[in-house]
C-alpha cells in the first residue's frame, strides 16, 4: 500500500542488504524500525534489527502534522547518528484526522491506469478539493469473477502536510521510498491471519486511531483528534500543578484506583472514550450483525492504568494492550548497546514496525 512512490532507489523501499526502515513521527517522539526478512525453508520471518526513538520537542509535530520541520530534521539526524543506521531509504507513516478512507470498488486496472482513474472515482466520495489531496487505492483482494471489480479502500490524504513531512525527512539526508497511512502500518504490525473482527486502537498524545479489521483486512479507519496530552493539560489545570507533575500523577493513578485524582482522571478521559465508542458504533450501524470480538491497544496512552478495562466496558469486548505479534525475534546487535529491542519498546514501535513490514508486502 503506497500513497506515493518515488523512483530512483534501485531497490525501492528496502536497502541493498534487504533491510526495510519504517518511520513513525508523533507528538512526543520519532521512532524507527529497521527490519530484515530472512528466508528459511520457504518461510519468511520478520526480524527487528534495530528499534529506536528520539524525543521531539513539544510543537514539532502537532495533531500528526509537522509544525517545526527543522526540529524534526535535526531529531532524525540525531536518531540516525545514535543508532548508527547505514540505510537511508525509509517508509514514512502519515496520520491526520483529515485523512479520509472510504470503501470503493474499482475496475481491475494496472497501477498506471488506476492512478489516472482514481480522481474520477474519488470525486463522488471524498469531501475535499481533489487538487489538495494525495489519492491512493488499497485493494482488499482480487477482482470479482463476474464483475471484474476490485473491492478496496480509497485513501485521500491532505497533500500539503504529506509534502511537508517528506521534505523534513529528506532534509535529514534520507530518501522517502514510500508514504503509507500510519493506520495501515499499525494493522500490519498487529493483525495476523485468522484474527476475528477486531478493533485496533493506537492511543497517542494528540491522536487516537481506530482501525476495525477482520483477518487484517481494514473495514473502518478513523483518526480522532484526541490523546493523552489534553488529559495531562487539563489535570494540571484542575490540580494546579505543573504539567510534568500532572503527567507523573496521571501515569501513577490512572483510572483504576479509587481516589479523588482517579475520579478526576475518569472525567477527563470520558470524551476520548465517547469518541472511541461513537466510531465503533458507526461501524456497527453500517455493518449490521457485525460483532467485534476483541480490542487491541497500542500507543503511550494505552499504558494508563485501568484504561484497557475502561475501553472494554465502552466497546463491550475484551481489551488488551498489545505488541507486534508477527515480530519473531529481535536479532542480537553486538557492539550496539543503544539499540533498544525489548518487548516493551516493540509495543511503542508497533507503527514503525508495521510500516517497515510494508516493504515485504
Ligand atoms: N505509563 C503511562 N500511562 C499513561 N499515559 C502514558 C504513559 N506513558 C505515556 N503516556 C502518554 O502517552 C502519550 C504519548 O503516546 P505516544 O508516544 O503513543 O504518542 P505519539 O506517537 O508521540 O503522539 P501522536 O501519535 O498522538 O502524535 C502521552 O500523552 C503520555 O502522557
Ligand atoms: Mg503516535
Image: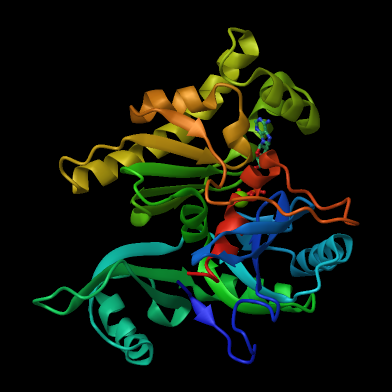
Q: How many marks?
A: 0
Q: Is residue 94 visible?
A: no
On screen, 304 above or below 129? above
Q: Could you tell me residue 171's position as x and y percent?
A: 77, 78
* 17 on left or right of 224: right
Q: Please state which of residues 148 and 167 is positioned toward the viewer in this rendering.
A: 148
Q: Quadrant of the N terminus?
A: bottom left
On screen, 344 above or below 262? below
Q: Could you tell me residue 172's position as x and y percent?
A: 79, 75
Q: Is residue 17 visible?
A: yes
The residue depicted at 59 percent of the width and 59 percent of the height is 46
Q: Could you tell me residue 122's position as x and y percent?
A: 30, 76
Q: Please state which of residues 19 and 111 is positioned toward the viewer in this rendering.
A: 19
Q: How are the residues colored?
A: rainbow
The residue depicted at 75 percent of the width and 22 percent of the height is 240
* 45 on left or right of 293: right
In which image quadrant can residue 355 be found? bottom right
In which image quadrant can residue 176 be found? bottom right
Return the residue found at the far front. 41
Q: Could you tell me residue 305's position as x and y percent?
A: 60, 23
* 184 on left or right of 120: right
Q: Please state which of residues 146 and 232 is positioned toward the viewer in this rendering.
A: 146
The residue depicted at 68 percent of the width and 51 percent of the height is 27
Return the residue found at the far left. 146
Amino acid at each position: 500500500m503506497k500513497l506515493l512512490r518515488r523512483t530512483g532507489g534501485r531497490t525501492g523501499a528496502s536497502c541493498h542488504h534487504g533491510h526495510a526502515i519504517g518511520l513513525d513521527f508523533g507528538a512526543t517522539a520519532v521512532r524507527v524500525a529497521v527490519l530484515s526478512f530472512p528466508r528459511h525453508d520457504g518461510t519468511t520471518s520478520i526480524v527487528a534489527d534495530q528499534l529506536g526513538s528520539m524525543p521531539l520537542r513539544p510543537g514539532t509535530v502537532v495533531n500528526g502534522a509537522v509544525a517545526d520541520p527543522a526540529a524534526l530534521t535535526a531529531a532524525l539526524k540525531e536518531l540516525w547518528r545514535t543508532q548508527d543506521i547505514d540505510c537511508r531509504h525509509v517508509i514514512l507513516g502519515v496520520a491526520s484526522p483529515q485523512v479520509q478512507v472510504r470503501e470503493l470498488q474499482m475496475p481491475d486496472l494496472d497501477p498506471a491506469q488506476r492512478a489516472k482513474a482514481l480522481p474520477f472515482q474519488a470525486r463522488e466520495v471524498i469531501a475535499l478539493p481533489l487538487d489538495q489531496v494525495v489519492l491512493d487505492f488499497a485493494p482488499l483482494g482480487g477482482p470479482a469473477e463476474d464483475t471484474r471489480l476490485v473491492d478496496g479502500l480509497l485513501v485521500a490524504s491532505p497533500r500539503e502536510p504529506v509534502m511537508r513531512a517528506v521534505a523534513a525527512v529528506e532534509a535529514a539526508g534520507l530518501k522517502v521510498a514510500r508514504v503509507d497511512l500510519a493506520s495501515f502500518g499499525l494493522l500490519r504490525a498487529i493483525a495476523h491471519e485468522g484474527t476475528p473482527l477486531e478493533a485496533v486502537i493506537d492511543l497517542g498524545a494528540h491522536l487516537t486511531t481506530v482501525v476495525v479489521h477482520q483477518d487484517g483486512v481494514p473495514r473502518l479507519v478513523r483518526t480522532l483528534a484526541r490523546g493523552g496530552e489534553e488529559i495531562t493539560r487539563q489535570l494540571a489545570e484542575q490540580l494546579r500543578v505543573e504539567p510534568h507533575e500532572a503527567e507523573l500523577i496521571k501515569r501513577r493513578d490512572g483510572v483504576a484506583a479509587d481516589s479523588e485524582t482517579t475520579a478526576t482522571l475518569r472525567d477527563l478521559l470520558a470524551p476520548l472514550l465517547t469518541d472511541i465508542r461513537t466510531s465503533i458504533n458507526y461501524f456497527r450501524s453500517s455493518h449490521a450483525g457485525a460483532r467485534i470480538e476483541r480490542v487491541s491497544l497500542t500507543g503511550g496512552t494505552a499504558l494508563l492504568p485501568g484504561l484497557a478495562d475502561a475501553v472494554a466496558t465502552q466497546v463491550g469486548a475484551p481489551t488488551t494492550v498489545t505488541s507486534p505479534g508477527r515480530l519473531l525475534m529481535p536479532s542480537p546487535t553486538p557492539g550496539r548497546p543503544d539499540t533498544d529491542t525489548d518487548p516493551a519498546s516493540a509495543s511503542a514501535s508497533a507503527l514503525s514496525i508495521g510500516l517497515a513490514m510494508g516493504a515485504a508486502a
